[in-house]
Image (tube, rainbow, N blue to C red):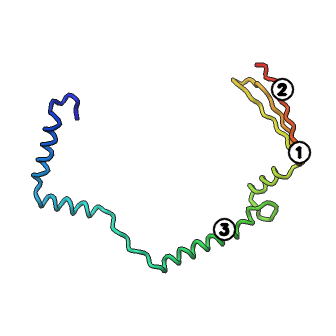
Amino acid sequence: MNPTDPTPLDTLLDDSIEAAREVDDYALADAARRFRNRLPQARPRRSPVASWFRVAGVAALLVLAVGLAPLLLPGKPGASAFAEARAWFEQYETLQFEMKTSRDGQVLSTVRVWSDESGATRIETPPITH
């Protein structure tokens, strides 16, 4: 509604009700028929045989997934590259990395971390002077 419209709401409501009363029966029946035609049609119920086929399909997929699972495990022929990389990071003697923190291209701090296979870890962090 336009805020500057001087027509009171009661008048607009009365006009709408009167317009609804003036609809003839033929137009109303035609509108109802078009509405029903646009509704989605009900699907027929599936037979129990179709349900069993779905269950069999799911069981076949599970068997296939279990059969392919060994291919994803590391250390066996045909293992995926992801599994091999994960195994490489899990089985190590010493792991070392360096992390630098910078701002506007200037290095603020450098953190060095060493870890061995037993889980012992050493972290070197110089004091931040900026």
Q: Are marks 1 and 2 in contact (CB under 8 Å)?
A: no
Q: Name which residue lies at 23% across and 30% down.
A: 3
Instruction: Indicate the quadrant containing the N terminus: top left, top right, bottom left or bottom right.
Output: top left
Q: Residues within 10 Å of mark 2 (few under 14, many from 20)?
A: few
Tell me the SS state at disc 3: helix
Q: Name which residue lies at 87% across and 37% down.
A: 122
Q: Position of residue 114 (x, y in %)?
A: 86, 39
Q: Is residue 34 left or right of residue 86?
A: left
In front: 6, or 105? 6
Position above or below: 2 against 23 = above
Label number found at residue 126: 2
Quarter residue 73 falls in: bottom right
To which residue does mark 3 refer? 65
User: Given this view, does label 2 or label 3 mark the residue nearer the observer?
Assistant: 2
Q: Position of residue 24 (x, y in %)?
A: 10, 57
Position above or below: 60 against 40 = below
Position above or below: 72 against 47 = above
Name the residue type under label 1.
Asp
Label number found at residue 116: 1
Mark 1 or mark 3, which is nearer the start of the sequence?
Answer: 3
Name the residue type under label 2.
Pro
Q: Position of residue 26 (x, y in %)?
A: 12, 61
Number of numbered markers: 3
User: Given this view, does label 3 or label 1 mark the residue nearer the observer?
Assistant: 1
Q: CA distance from mark 2 to mark 3?
A: 50 Å
